[in-house]
């Protein structure tokens, strides 16, 4: 009947479990969709909205660079045109991606920004949604004209590059959160596994940071290479009187195409005529004139990865100050990313080796034998799991730690949370069989168990001497002891029957003695360790406190009954 009832209850719970699974699955799908489609983030709760916002920011940070690939060079007319397909894709992704900032502003105002709006955060979000690349790259750059165009290009470059800082800030926050979590201070039993996960996350995040940096620097390399050729056009136009410079392919201006081709050769470039510096390879490849996006993207990404990994040492710059500044930033970023990546890679490999060492050491420890020796194995599988976690956490800190007995387990800082549980499992049933404690309340026996402290005695150490006051009661759990008295009687006791009790005469003494440690009974025998001995001892003061406290409570109850 019990089995049938259990089956019926399980059948009743199955629809609830299925509903719960569907609910979790729907929530996961919504989060994934909210990363790709930011307007859905308004449907999320506050606890998950921030994490989804960070992931969405990482995704759309990668897509923002599409604007830098929009400009194309019309080699025949020596003017600037736009790649329509990349332009449409960039505008769509930018418009969809910017909605996450509008939603974030709305949610922040709704949650309390109306009363005390943090101006710095509000300005940061506002800057992120400004259409800087749309205006600078799609409108101003293709229609630049006049002798002061270089100043215009410098301002545009500053605006486009500066907006990447607030838009990349969520990536920095996530990077900081993962890199600066101090797992070592956690008191959890899972500290080692958490540490390993965080180190692996740091390593993967740094590789991702390397790729993101290469992705962005490669796009800017392409964008600045076009501007470098425009700079050459301006230089060529100044060398001829009456030349009117313009990047537009629509506006009709007076300029010599032949002059541009002679003074700005790109295939191949001629450094004697004009030095294109670090953009020499980009212009020679002719990718600025190609509409094959995948080819130019992979070329730029490959160039950025190779130069970041070499800290920009292979960059050959011209005398241009802005170009040298760009090369300096490139080199510093490559060095910083490499240092972080190398450091976390080294830490990751060390932890992999330490994890392998822990697995080997855990296999060498016979947990079942240790627990079986103390009578804990058959019915304490949860205890075994807790002990294994504590030992694993200790081995993560000290790979040479040796586990021999229960003392080596209970002395662990990591085992502090369940030490009392182990003691009760070891001695509670034993105490219930001791004369004088058989009728004690279970709570008193559990308190006595908690006061039992593990003690180790080396070989040939005196544990109790005959004629000395008996100040403690203890269980002998491991080892061999020699017991003798002045009459010549002696015997050797080997722990065959587990948890042998000594000093049980103290139980009768504490029942009648006063609260002072006076008139303690004297030991009638000497107990000496014959090998390494492990005991669990309780001081007479602790034993007397717990027993007398129970007696005091019983007397108060009797007095209350008499009064009533």
Image (cartoon, grey):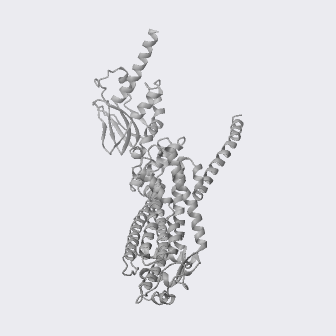
In the rendered view, would you say 238 is above or below 47? below
Q: Is residue 340 left or right of residue 130?
A: left
**Which of the 4 quarters of the picture holds residue 472?**
top left
In depth, the one of 22 and 234 nearer the eye is 234
Query: Would residue 517 be visible to someone looking at this image?
Result: yes
Task: Give the x, y percent position of residue 206.
Answer: 45, 64
In depth, the one of 151 and 265 nearer the eye is 151
Residue closest to the far front: 242
In depth, the one of 513 and 384 nearer the eye is 384
Number of dots carrying numbers: 0
In the rendered view, would you say 369 is above or below 324? above
In depth, the one of 422 and 527 nearer the eye is 422
Query: Would residue 368 be visible to someone looking at this image?
Result: no
- Measuring 44% from the left and 72% from the top, which residue is drawn there? 152
In the rendered view, would you say 270 is above or below 344? below
**Which of the 4 quarters of the picture holds residue 338?**
bottom left
Task: Give the x, y percent position of residue 400.
Answer: 38, 56
Task: Give the x, y percent position of residue 110.
Answer: 52, 45
State which quarter of the image contains the N terminus.
Answer: top right
- Measuring 33% from the left and 35% from the top, which residue is drawn there? 484
Q: Is residue 34 left or right of residue 209?
A: right
In the rendered view, would you say 255 is above or below 419? below
Task: Give the x, y percent position of residue 491.
Answer: 37, 37
């Amino acid at each position: 009947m019990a089995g049938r009832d259990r089956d019926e209850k399980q059948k009743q719970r199955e629809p609830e479990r299925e509903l719960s699974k569907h609910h979790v699955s729907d929530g996961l799908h919504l989060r994934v969709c909210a990363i790709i489609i930011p307007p859905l983030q308004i449907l999320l709760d506050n606890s998950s909205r921030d994490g989804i916002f960070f992931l969405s920011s990482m995704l759309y940070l990668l897509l923002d660079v599409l604007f830098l690939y929009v400009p194309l060079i019309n080699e025949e007319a020596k003017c600037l045109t736009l790649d329509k397909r990349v332009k449409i894709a960039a505008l769509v992704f930018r418009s969809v991606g910017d909605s996450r900032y509008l939603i974030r502003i709305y949610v922040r105002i709704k949650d309390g920004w109306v009363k005390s709006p943090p101006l710095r955060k509000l300005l940061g979000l506002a800057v992120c949604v400004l259409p800087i690349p749309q205006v600078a790259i799609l409108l101003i750059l293709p229609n630049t004209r006049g002798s002061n165009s270089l100043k215009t290009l410098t301002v545009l470059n500053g605006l486009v590059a500066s907006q990447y800082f607030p838009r990349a800030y969520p990536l920095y926050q996530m990077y900081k959160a993962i890199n600066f979590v101090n797992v070592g201070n956690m008191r959890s039993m899972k500290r080692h596994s958490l540490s390993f996960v965080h180190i692996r996350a740091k390593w993967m995040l740094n590789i991702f940071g390397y790729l993101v940096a290469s992705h962005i620097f490669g796009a800017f390399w392409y964008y600045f290479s076009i501007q470098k050729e425009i700079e050459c056009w301006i230089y060529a136009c100044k060398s001829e009187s009456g030349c009117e410079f313009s990047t537009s392919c629509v506006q009709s201006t007076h300029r010599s195409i032949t002059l541009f081709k002679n003074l700005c050769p790109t295939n191949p470039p001629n450094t004697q005529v004009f030095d294109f510096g670090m953009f020499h390879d980009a212009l020679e490849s002719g990718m600025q004139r190609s509409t094959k996006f995948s080819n130019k993207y992979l070329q730029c990404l490959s160039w950025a990865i190779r130069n970041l990994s070499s800290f920009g040492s292979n960059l050959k710059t011209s005398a241009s100050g802005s170009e040298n500044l760009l090369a300096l930033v490139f080199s510093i970023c490559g060095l910083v990313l490499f240092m972080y990546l190398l450091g976390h890679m080294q830490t990751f490999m060390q932890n992999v080796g330490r994890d392998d060492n822990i697995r080997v050491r855990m296999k060498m420890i016979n947990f079942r034998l240790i627990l079986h020796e103390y009578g804990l194995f058959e019915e304490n599988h949860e205890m075994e799991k807790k002990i294994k976690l504590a030992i694993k956490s200790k081995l993560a800190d000290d790979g040479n730690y040796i586990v021999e007995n229960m003392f080596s387990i209970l002395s662990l800082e990591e085992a502090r949370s369940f030490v009392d549980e182990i003691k009760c499992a070891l001695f509670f049933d034993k105490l219930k069989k001791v004369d004088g404690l058989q009728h004690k309340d279970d709570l008193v026996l559990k308190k006595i168990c908690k006061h039992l402290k593990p003690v180790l005695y080396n070989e040939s150490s005196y544990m109790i001497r005959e004629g000395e006051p008996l100040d403690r009661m203890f269980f002998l759990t491991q080892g061999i002891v020699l017991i003798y008295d002045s009459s010549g009687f002696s015997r050797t006791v080997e722990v065959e029957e587990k948890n042998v009790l000594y000093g049980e005469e103290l139980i009768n003494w504490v029942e009648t003695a006063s609260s002072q440690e006076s008139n303690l009974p004297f030991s009638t025998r000497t107990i000496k360790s014959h090998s390494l001995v492990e005991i669990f001892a309780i001081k007479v003061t602790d034993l007397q406190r717990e027993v007398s406290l129970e007696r005091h409570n019983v007397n108060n109850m009797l007095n209350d009954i008499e009064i009533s």
